[in-house]
Amino acid sequence: MHLSMSNAKNSRRDFLKKSAAAGAGFFIVPRNVLGGPGFIAPSDQLRIAAFGAGGKGYGDLTNAYNSGANRIVALCDVDPKQAARAMADHPKAKFYHDYRVLLDKERIDAVTISTPDHTHAVMTYDAMMQGKAVYVQKPLTHTIAEARLLTETAREQRVVTQMGNQGGSNQGVVKVKEWIDSGIVGEVKHVNVWTNRPVWPQGISMPEADEQALPEDVAWDLWLGPASKRPYTPNLHPFNWRGFWEYGTGALGDMGCHLFDAPYKALGLGYPVAVQASVADVYSRMWTPDYTPEACPISTRVTIDFPGGVVFEWTDGGIQPALPDLLVENNFVPDSSGVMMIGSKGIITVDTYGNHPKLFIEGREVEHFDTDAQGNLDLIHNSSWTEAVKAGYGSDQHKALTSSFDYAGPFTETVLMGNIAIRAHQMRRQNENGRYDYFGRRKLYWNGEGMRITNLEEANQFVTKPYREGWRRANL
């Protein structure tokens, strides 16, 4: 039974009158009488902290708050200016520069983590080791070794987790799997995935450090976190870090967890078996390509092989695949990023985040699954996590999550496999003639369980990374 607003107010008045008359008498009162329609008792709200409160972090904490379904009790950011909007929205939330101090001092249930890629793993690990549920932006981690660690730790600590690739909760992904399982497109062996990223500076040398330019309120050493010590370097924080390997994962890391999700899920894939990359060269002077191994390239092509002969072909930097005749005949116009799953009987295309899948079969009208009506994907994906946290580890809500670490961990490992091939492509050594041999430009074979490249030992350095003293966790 629901009370109208006027009835709720009258009920509250009656309750107060009876309380005054009864003195110390005890009453059990419905929550909707005390708080009004839509009231959520504090005991039913998660106490949430946000690590990274500006940009995407602001969106993540706002979705976790979910119009008051939960409480934002603490905010953490190395740059208070980035967190200003969140602080204004949640004036009672305590602010911290250092997430470790926050974890030590605050009583919280869960955290959202929306920081540069290189800090995801240490923050997530530390939170899970304290039993906190976590929602972490994609890519889940900076390296494959970190993804494996977080997957195992989430199980050991029995915490509810979700990676922020919101398209995973798109009904379009469900429709794609339905089409694949029905056999209507036949056997799918080749998947094209493309993006217009990078849309930030990439393929360039690291900007020069300038300690004098350090903004007064920015905690630069905390921003560096596990990365090597470096004087303040402009044009990295808050966004352009994405184009440098020490902090980001390039175009593939940025968009792979969005774009690979539909075909990876629908085809039921696991660890890849091989990967190969080619990389665009930049020439600032004649005949001599620029060499910037610290930077992610401006454009790449990556092929990832899976057991059974399935191949994902990734292109970035705006390079799109050639369209089969079936798509041309049906006036298909590719979006700036997208997916094309080529079967023996037909083709499925999907836009970014699993949106608007289309089914192309020779001689039939194109079938378009409209995903516009389902609402805010970010909110759907995030709120399903908060409700699963309330329901508990192992609950039906937890098992229904589309990107918990049981899935997101191995999936992220697959995406980051491509970056191993890209970085191997950039490796070189000087030969006896004074020229350079680019010895990593080959197909790399992968042992998924063992997390190792089996035919080029030097490439295994990219499975993990160096950590600054005090920042290494567990067996990394």
Image: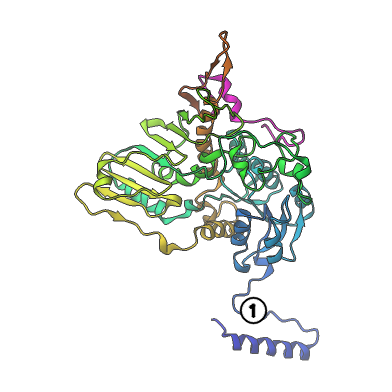
Give residue 115's position: percent from left, percent from top: 65, 47
Report the residue at 49% width, 58% height from top: 377
In the displayed structure, 424 sits above or below 430; it is: below
> Does the magenta run of residues contain 135?
no
Left or right: where 171 falls relative to 115: left
Count of marks, rendered view: 1
- Which quadrant would the N terminus be assigned to in this image? bottom right
Give residue 438's position: percent from left, percent from top: 52, 19
Report the residue at 47% width, 54% height from top: 169
The residue furthest front is 286
| Callout 1 crowding tier (Cα within 10 Å): few <14, some 14–19, many ≥20 | few
Report the residue at 55% width, 26% height from top: 426
Which segment is the magenta one?
449-476
Q: Nearer the viewer, residue 4 or 471?
A: 471
Give residue 263's position: percent from left, percent from top: 40, 43
Q: Quadrant of residue 450?
A: top right
The residue furthest top is 432
> Does the magenta run of residues contain 472?
yes
Q: Nearer the viewer, residue 328 or 186?
A: 328
- Which quadrant would the C terminus be assigned to in this image? top right
Q: Quadrant of residue 248?
A: top right
Report the residue at 71% width, 81% height from top: 27
Looking at the rendered structure, the secondary structure element under dot 1 is: loop
In the displayed structure, 429 sits above or below 415; it is: above
- According to the picture, the residue beneath numbered tag 1 turns out to be 30
- Going by the numbered disc 1, the residue's amino acid type is Pro
In the displayed structure, 151 sits above or below 377; it is: above
Q: Nearer the viewer, residue 248 or 462?
A: 248
